[in-house]
Amino acid sequence: MNLTDIALSRYSTKAFDPARKISAEQVEQLQSLLRLSPSSVNSQPWHFVIASSEAGKARVAKGTQGFFQFNEAKVLNASHVVVFCAKTEISDEYLQHLLDSEEQAGRFAEPSHKEMVRGARATFVNIHRHDLKDAQHWMEKQVYLNMGTLLLGAAALGIDALPMEGIDMKALDTEFGLREQGFTAIAVVALGYRAEQDFNATLAKARLPAAEIFTQI
């Protein structure tokens, strides 16, 4: 596997072939990527709504009405659509839940290690909760790390993808009762296979030159 080749081949798919579906095995791999993505202090402040049925995609498409109608076909024609959601609060109860989950997974060889993790995580979380007062933004950053993992992983599997912020997030929050569950939608990723008429598939990839973006020291 050559990561440069994968990065060169992937692009934001603008038209999906509705007849082509992602295999169950590959869907399982994509879900593993979502679950195993890194996050700051292993905070995992995310939730994912995954739509694969026509009815499910139609529910996600409720976020593409009105001004965002240009994204409706991309949602409906994709094989799978993932709504990326961020937590609206990182509470002490949730931090304890993380710690308990890590202990159950066997991460702590000694009880003192658990307390070290508790203190270190609380320190960083409290910086964002109380000092910087940007906890929501910080949690959304972790979700975007996850999205990058999914996009690269999908490309490695030969699956096309389109990340979308042109969505009515409030409509999705309402449709799926996300705020009542302590989450809010922040982006959508459509997954599937490009249609023959996708204009973006044949356009040259354009990125700033290496000399402009790298400083070697």
Image (spheres, rainbow, N blue to C red):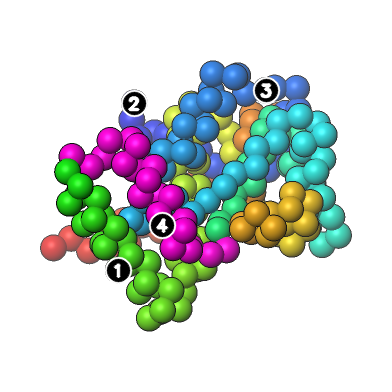
Quick check: marks 1 and 2 in contact, CB under 8 Å? no
Q: Which residue is mark 2?
A: 1
Residue 148 in the figure: left or right of residue 11: left
Give the secondary structure at mark 3.
loop
Q: Which residue is mark 3?
A: 21
Give the secondary structure at mark 4.
helix
Label 3 and label 4: CA atoms lie apart by 38 Å
Classify mark 3: residues with Cα within 10 Å, few (<14), some (14-19) or many (20+).
some
Q: Looking at numbered disc 1 in the image, what kind of residue is underneath it?
A: Thr
Does residue 6 appear in this view?
yes
**Residue pictured at 50% horizontal, 47% vertical:** 147
- In terms of image quadrants, where is residue 66? bottom right
In the picture, the disc for residue 123 is: 1
Q: Horizontal and vertical percent for residue 138?
A: 45, 66
N-terminal label among 3 and 1? 3
- Magenta residues, start to end: 88-109
Given this view, does label 3 or label 4 mark the residue nearer the observer? 4
N-terminal label among 3 and 2? 2
Given this view, does label 3 or label 1 mark the residue nearer the observer? 1
N-terminal label among 2 and 4? 2
Residue 11 in the figure: left or right of residue 116: right
Above or below 57: residue 124: below
N-terminal label among 1 and 2? 2
Q: Which residue is mark 4?
A: 95
Given this view, does label 3 or label 2 mark the residue nearer the observer? 3
As drawn, which residue projects farthest toward the bottom? 131
